[in-house]
Amino acid sequence: MLTAAGLDNVIHDILSTAWAYPGCPVLTGDYWLNNQQFDQSTLVFLLDAQGTEVSPSLVFSGVDWLKVNNLRAPLATFPDVDGYVDSQELLRCFNVYMSTLNGYQHSQVDSPLIQLNLTQESWSVLPVIPVNNKQGERIYYLAADGNHNWKRVPLKELES
């Protein structure tokens, strides 16, 4: 069983890893524990999506695309051939950096999650992109859809 101090250490390690390595997806520093949505406790981390723009896919129903509008945007290092953020590439990269965590044993991408096994515990890690309306109010999150795109996740599913 993970203690509060153990959880704090895992969170600190993940945030430190993201901030220490330039190729790692940039996190905002905001996170929380979700015990309701998935099979095991899930650490939800917010990705820094400044310089990108969300638009619904014109091709696929229920899919959103994340357009890179600024080549210096934190997520600009994960483009697909059309200039959109490739969710699978982002998850693969984030997964590679998980191997630097203290107590690391194994991790794997299981979209939209990264399954992380440490010496003392196992976690699901869910990196998401917060989406706000023009008034700056959070309206939903984007999570990897398993096909290089993004799917909307309602606030109530992650924040409850």
Image: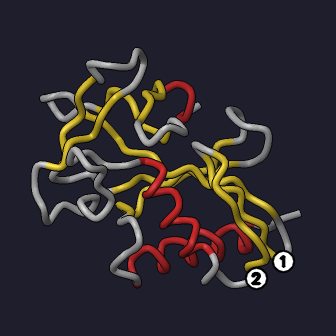
Where residue 61 appears, as percent x and y from the top left, is 40, 15
Which residue is located at x 41 percent, y 72 percent? 24
Which residue is located at x 44 percent, y 73 percent? 18
- Viewer-proximal residue, 107 or 7? 107
- Viewer-proximal residue, 67 or 33? 67
Disc 1 to disc 2: CB gap under 8 Å: yes
Q: Which residue is identified by label 2?
A: 103
- Viewer-proximal residue, 65 or 40? 65
Which residue is located at x 28 percent, y 65 percent? 77
Which quarter of the picture shows residue 141?
top left
Numbered circles on residues, count: 2
Q: Quadrant of the N terminus?
A: bottom right
Is residue 60 placed above or below 23 in the rendered structure? above
Is residue 32 placed above or below 96 in the rendered structure? above
Where residue 143 appears, as percent x and y from the top left, is 47, 39
Where residue 21 appears, as percent x and y from the top left, is 40, 82
Query: Label 2: few (<14), some or many (≥20) within 10 Å?
Result: few
Which numbered marker is on residue 100?
A: none
The residues tagged by marks 1 and 2 sit, at their Cα atoms, a distance apart of: 5 Å
Q: Residue furthest top?
A: 61
Please name the amino acid that badge 2 sits on.
Answer: Gly
Image side of residue 117 versus residue 96, left or right: right
SS for callout 2:
loop
Image side of residue 151 versus residue 105, left or right: left
Query: Which comes sooner in the sequence, label 1 or label 2?
Result: 2
Please name the amino acid that badge 1 sits on.
Answer: Thr
Which numbered marker is on residue 119?
A: 1
Where residue 144 appears, as percent x and y from the top left, is 49, 41
Q: Residue furthest front?
A: 81
- Viewer-proximal residue, 121 or 52? 52
